[in-house]
Image (spheres, rainbow, N blue to C red):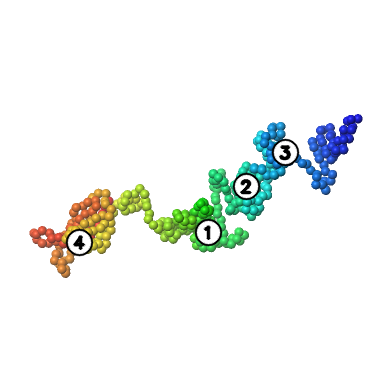
Amino acid sequence: MLRNNFLIFLTSLGLLFNSNAQVGIGNTNPQSTLDIAVDNMNAPSNTDGILVPRVNTFPTTDPTSHQNGMMVFLTKDIPGYFIGFHYWDHPKTQWIPIGAEEWKDGVNASGDNLIFATQAKVSGTDVVITDDGRIGFGTSDPIERFEFKGPGDNDFQITSANPNPPNVILYNTGGTLDTPAALASNGEIGSFIVKTHDGDRIVETGGFRFFMDGVATPGSAPSKFVINTTPSGSIFQQPRIVVRNDGNTGIGTQEPSEKLDVAGNLRVRNLTSGPLYTNSHGVVSNTPVGPVTVAAGLIEANGSALKIYGASVSRINKGNYQVTFLTPRSSNNYVINLATTDCNDAGDCDFDDPGITYLNRQTTGFRVNIGDSDNGGTAKEDIDLEFTFSVIDF
């Protein structure tokens, strides 16, 4: 009698147990361990459903292995977790949101609508796509179309195992994406830009920029490459190096006329002072390959130079001149060539057989003496007279 009354009581509650230990609520033929039915599937009421335990935060003491798989509903966002169903994963000792791989709607601090990856958010990293198509990794408010943001290591790597290596391709076109056309003359094709903070704001401080070098036509797309840096005391970039479409490279000039055109001084280290030379292979050094004229000049009688190279000349006294090299030689074993004019008694010239010699040859220079030797047995008479000299070394 008691057993029958208990069955009647359970039936009044809408519960039915069958011989397979299956429980039905609202139905007489449960198809699973627990099978709950509603009165009208086509018109459910606002109370049809299951309420799992609701919590405002997770327990301070972690559940044990006996609760592995236990489910709760988090009623509000807490650090690292969002409103929704969560289950206890004991092997990981962590509450796992149900549907963690899914994207959820959200709004960033700037008020932009977006979707975010919930699992990445739980681990403390924002991965978002805004409604206007900006993608952010490490930020919920990407500034550019694609932005990586985070402390520490933010390297970007593209790995390939194919004979065709990975490429970074920058494509820009005039016209539209649907109807591309040639860029304007000197239009920018693409850039790699660096930024920093100057203590007041974020500024662009340099980069590698590619431009059209003229106008593109069918079968011809001339381009140039420019490197920019920012000088001290400024936040504005300046072009420093340019490579034009013909291969001419300019440093300090945007209009190079040679393969290397430098506007300013050029320094080659590990060379001693002196002239530079090239060998048959075009190698530059300061070691002469063969005989080299290191100094030459055309000197007036008073010691003034009409033309001179690699030296200076001064008149010491009548008929005597000092030639001084601009750069001392490594030894005094150089070759001196001298010549002077023969006036042939013309005008006020009263000598017709001048002679020219050198003396006191040093690494710093030498002396020149000019005199008239056509006077019989008397001593040579020093005279001032125009002369030329050249010095060859090897």
Tell me the tag on residue 127. 2
CA–CA distance in space, label 2 to label 3: 26 Å
Residue drawn 70% across the image and 38% down it: 87
What is the C-alpha distance between the residues marked 2 and 4?
A: 88 Å
Q: Earlier in the sequence, mark 2 or mark 3?
A: 3
Judging by the rendered image, the residue that carries numbered circle 4 is: 340
N-term-proximal mark, 3 vs 4: 3
Q: Could you tell me residue 343's position as x and y percent?
A: 17, 66
257 on left or right of 99: left
The residue indicated by pointer 1 is 188
How would you rate the neighbour count of disc 4 (Cα within 10 Å): few for under 14, some for 14-19, many for 20 or more?
Answer: some
Residue extending furthest right? 1
Reading the image, the residue beneath label 3 is: 71
* Amino acid type at mark 1: Glu
Q: Which mark sits nearer the N-terminus, 2 or 4?
A: 2
Q: Nearer the viewer, mark 3 or mark 4?
A: 3
Seen at 19% across and 52% down, the residue is 360
Give the side of residue 332 with respect to residue 162, left or right: left
Of badges 2 and 3, nearer the viewer stands 3
Q: Position of residue 239 (x, y in %)?
A: 46, 57
- Say which mark, if any, is on residue 333: none
Check disc 3 and report its element: helix, strand or loop.
strand
Residue type of the residue flagged with mark 2? Val
Is the C-beta separation of discs 2 and 4 under 8 Å? Answer: no
